Image: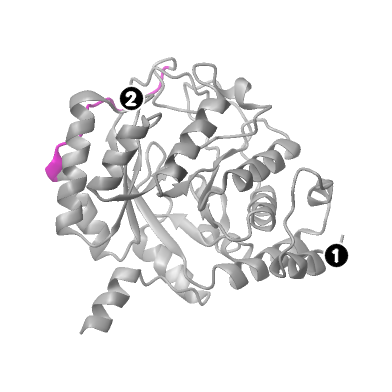
Amino acid sequence: MDMQKLAEEIIEGKRLTRKDDLSFFLDCDLDDLCKGADKIREHFVGDKVDLCSIINGRSGRCPEDCKYCAQSAHHHTDCEVYGFLPEEQIIEACKMNEREGVDRFSIVTAGKALTGEEFEKAIHAYETMKKECRIDLCASMGFLTREQLHRLHEAGVSSYHHNIETSKRYFPQICTTHTYEQKIATLKMVKEEGMYVCSGGIIGMGETWEDRIDMAVSLFECGVDSIPINSLMPIKGTPLENLERISEPDILRTVALFRYINPTADIRLGAGRALLTNDGELAFESGVSATITGNMLTTVACATIRSDKKMLEGIGRNVTPEYEKTQKTAK
């Protein structure tokens, strides 16, 4: 397969689907694959890198049994446990990320869904952030109802994150307390609400290359706007603690094939950047157009916001958020 020719065809309008034989992604030349993916990224997304940061708004005691997760009550880990954070702490974190020039800020909460009094606290926090900050607001709060999604949207949340985690085939091997179909149904509601849809998954959990390709196609079929790709960092006390860490070439092949299949989406580096050299510089030259930056949930962040921006500017990428451009124009 001529990957440069395929990249040109995708730029001209071709889209890869389940009807296509996509097995060439497994053995095509990695360098050619990555160069083609970057050409597609440059055409559809440009040089802007979308930076997002998250705060762990509620931690631990999750009733779901996701095998990779330190926050599951089914596993014995050293995960910190606490209820919904005080609003002041959330607002302070949001403002800090805005000062550092991050594009998006999200509250992420453990549990199947945020409900009751804690959900009301989240709504109030978002309303306050919307009034006091210019940064785009995101949320990741599990299986919310249509009404809850609408209330978040009205409170100022423009993006909702909900990973499908892996392929439909492999999902039951990773989680048994909810289904892949429930995941897809939630994404459809988010899209119908008119929000920016962020959904991806984790690689290196024992899945096959076919599973990774299937996940990429499923996300294309859902029409997602942002695809976070996390590389498993095995956590002691979880069922996946003894898995071998995924290699850098395999991470690069994965992000590149995701770009071919999802040419217009933001392909976003998530957890596991410690597995990449130079904070993932090669990934940003292999189709990646976005990243989570700063402090992450239950793994130690390998890069700070400032070092990320310095690295990205060094390879010619634009890291100025829209709200800063608007402010300069107004002046």
- On whether residue 174 falls in the magenta region, the answer is no
Element carrying mark 1: loop
- Magenta stretch prevailing secondary structure: loop
Colour pattern of the rendering: one colour
Decide: is 232 above or below 285: above
The quadrant where residue 211 appears: top right
Q: In this view, does 294 lie to the left or right of 16?
A: left
Q: Which mark is residue 2?
A: 1
Which sits in the foreground, 245 or 176?
176
Count of numbered tags: 2
Q: Which mark is residue 60?
A: 2
In which quadrant of the rendered image does the C terminus lie? bottom left
Q: What's drawn in magenta, residue-wise?
A: 76-88
Q: Distance between the residues labelled 2 and 1?
A: 47 Å
Element carrying mark 2: loop
Q: Which residue is drawn at 53% across and 74% down?
A: 315
The quadrant where residue 144 appears: top left
Residue 318 visible to an observer of this rendering: yes
- Return the x and y of residue 65 as percentages of the image width and height: 48, 18
Q: In this view, does 141 lie to the left or right of 11?
A: left
- Return the x and y of residue 305 as percentages of the image width and height: 35, 60
Identity, as a three-letter code, of the amino acid under mark 1? Asp
Q: Which residue is drawn at 34% across and 56% down?
A: 104
Identity, as a three-letter code, of the amino acid under mark 2? Gly
